[in-house]
Amino acid sequence: MSNIEHRTPEQPRYAGLTGAEASARFKADGANELPTVRRRDVLRIILDVVREPMLLMLIGAGAIYLVIGEPQDALMLLGFVIVIIGITFYQERKTERALDALRELSSPRAAVIRDGRVQRIPGREVVRGDHLLLVEGDRVPADAIVVESNYLLVNESLLTGESVPVRKIPGAPDAAMTQPGGDDHPAMYSGTMVIQGQGVAVVRAIGTATELGRIGKVLETAKSETSPMEVQTRRLVRNLAVVGLGLCTLVVVLYVLTRGGWLAGLLAGLTMAMAILPEEVPVVLTVFLALGAWRMSQKHALTRRLQAIQAIGSATVLCVDKTGTLTMNCMTVSRIYADPMMYRADADDTTVPPENCHATVEYGILASADVPVDPMEIALREMGEGRLKDTEHLHRNWTLVREYPLSRQLLAMSRVWKSPSGRHYVIAAKGAPEAIFDLCHLDSARSEVLHRRTREMAEDGLRVIAVARAQFQQTELPGAQHDFDFEFLGLVGFADPVRPQVPAAIRSCHRAGIRVVMITGDYPGTACNIARQIGLPRTGEFITGPELASMDEQELQRRIRNVDIFARVVPEQKLRLVNALQANGEVAVMTGDGVNDAPALRSASVGIAMGARGTDVAREAAGLVLLDDDFSTIVQAVRHGRRIIDNLKKAIAYILGIHVPIAGLSLLPVIFRWPLILLPVHVVFLELVIDPVCSIVFEAEGEEADIMRRPPRRLDEPLFDRRTIGLSLLQGFIVLVVTLAVYATTLHRLGDAEARALTYTTLVVANLSLILTNRSWTSSILQTLRTPNPALWWVIGGASGVMGLILYVPFLRGLFRFGFLHPADLLFCLAAGGASILWFEGFKFLYRRRKSRTNSKS
């Protein structure tokens, strides 16, 4: 075992690299990552866009215009091709930038010492010479040599295929890198996993220079997963494509049979296909999920799996850890019990505590890690460094001889020390009070008094540990902690304040129909006290870990319906809780941070790992990662998940709605032998409005006012339910009726060109009206106009401006086959197009009134 000096995280023994040295090495060696799939360049994106069915049909229509001697129409269509490529390219790059930002955030984190301070950085920023701090659950980010360790066990199965962990011992920083496998070597390898202990290692190789890079093995990478929404979207597009192909064929055949001319018929058929094919749907889904995940990351919730976005919005139960999620995870020593007195330690007080408390603090520090991560160990060290600074109770020159780690059988750890002048060993122990009482072999009367004191402190919301000491004079240390003759010193109570945002977030969950379940390893008294502070109902009811272990699955499923507090729970029991909740039909969200939490995180509807204190194992098993470990961020993720699904449904409804009149105006003139209303150029112009509306306007739309006052959406509820599809098709049908009425009343009175201009202008106005009314399916247009959405006005302003140019610039008017419209004609179009959506505004009014009556009765 190495000699490890006492030090705080702010004062590590190693200074590490300076920021300037790290920056220079990063520039010289590049990022610490293996080659990945190359990003698509500009040419590749353009080629992929051109292969889209809509673009191919446009190019085909342009070619037909050239053949029949209409070069102006051909050039306009090809110009539209360039514009659409530009819009799609912008969307693609925007999506890729969002995904790049997410990859950067999801890069495995590494704790390094730089400029004498411990810092957490993305694994790709690790450089040669960095000092890594490694603890249980960390994935090793680079090849390194261990220079300090405490029972460091590493799983190297990624490189060796052997699942048995290997033991690491310290070596010189310039020691040779041996082959993976085998115990008692100092070499660590990129991609392997620390499963026990902690240590410090100096990086020797990064990226492709690592063992992993040299032998060509690849780390587990996130595979492209197909979400339920993607499956539904593909089915919808496929079905409509089949319908479109059939109608296209029908239009071509009817046109040829009734009017003759294969090229003109093919042009009409292409127009029909372009009108009915909802090619925007896959783009919308990709953009919504990618940008939605990126927006969630800005709220400190990193999405690792797209399914999590759909599931988080449907959550019915949030199972959350108490420490660090509901509380601040920055504990302070609040009380010290050293028989016969209870000392209350004010956080703002810097005075030296009473003499009989000194030994409890002294040996609590000696029993803690040298580089503490546990908040209680940090609090003990801070009290020692702050209040016992100039006393004999701090031992920076003592030598650590051995450590007896905490185990499932004994929730206590001991560390064996030797002073420079000492002739015997000094043993410091700390852990769960009942475990320390057992080590000290206390009689029943003394145990009862201490148990009572422990309960009193726990009922006040404190987390309690006990401290003991022993001396040992033999040269050969025993194999177990029970072989020492421990003396009980005292109890230490730690306060971990509730995060100030949590009570409001809990109330928001209750209003949204979401139940909150608190899971903790603390005492029931501590858990119930915290539950009262945050506003959990049923704060007097709880189930402990031992009780949970004695229940069968049926009893657990019955009890879990009415209990919101689980105390003294070990991580392995979280999986049982998740399974019981889901067996009851709940959509369960589970939080976790440790290696043992991974099964529960993987099994939950949504697993949420802690980003700040969580292990890489937990992050890889989770669907979401909280970057700030804050419960209110989970609630924000629920809110954001619901918003994404709401807006996606609005966009899909709008797409289906607007394609109905476009398809109808393309098909009906062929069937009834009217002059053609829509030509390819007309459909393409509408697509230039529809695409950015779907992927920019609706994606940026704010949340509904009642988004957190409605029950959760069922996880198995289809995105395109009958109500959504029915209402959107009805919207489109009403617009079709209105535009056909405009065409019918003006065709014989004004002629083909003027009737086409009036009908098309009415269709554009109705299109913009559909955008406005679909911004919310509950609030009126006047109400939604108070909600800012800058993209909306750019789209509406741009469409209106271009439409004005088309109507009043003679060259453009000729290309669109339009007649001249007078101001009175424009007013008529505005009135007709706006009237097409009035029924839906009335529908929303009746819905709000019915809902208001229901709420008043309840």
Image (cartoon, grey):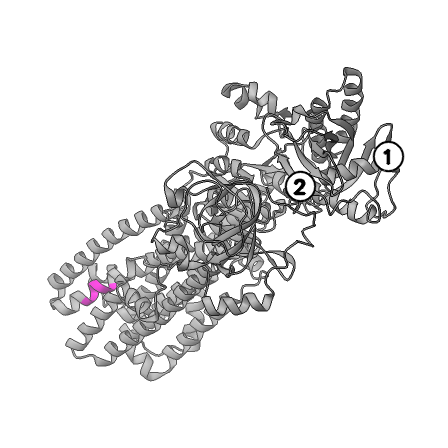
Q: Nearer the viewer, mark 1 or mark 2?
A: 2
622 sits left or right of 519 in the view = left
Please identify the quarter of the rendering in which residue 435 is found: top right
- In the image, farthest residue toward the bottom: 810
Q: Which mark is residue 400?
A: 2
Q: Dot 1 corresponds to which residue?
A: 356
Residue 833 screen position, x and y as percent: 42, 63
Most extreme residue toward the top, as rendered? Answer: 444
Main SS, magenta region, reads: helix
Residue 268 part of the magenta segment: yes
Q: Are marks 1 and 2 in contact (CB under 8 Å)?
A: no
Q: Which residues are magenta?
A: 267-271
47 inside magenta stretch: no
The x and y percentages for residue 813 are: 33, 79
The residue nearer to you, when weighing 683 against 49, is 49
Quadrant hosting residue 338: top right
Residue 775 in view, yes or no: no
Give the alpha-carbon distance from disc 1 to disc 2, as whole Å: 25 Å
Type of residue at label 2?
Leu
User: Which of the marked residues, 1 or 2, is nearer the chain's N terminus?
Assistant: 1
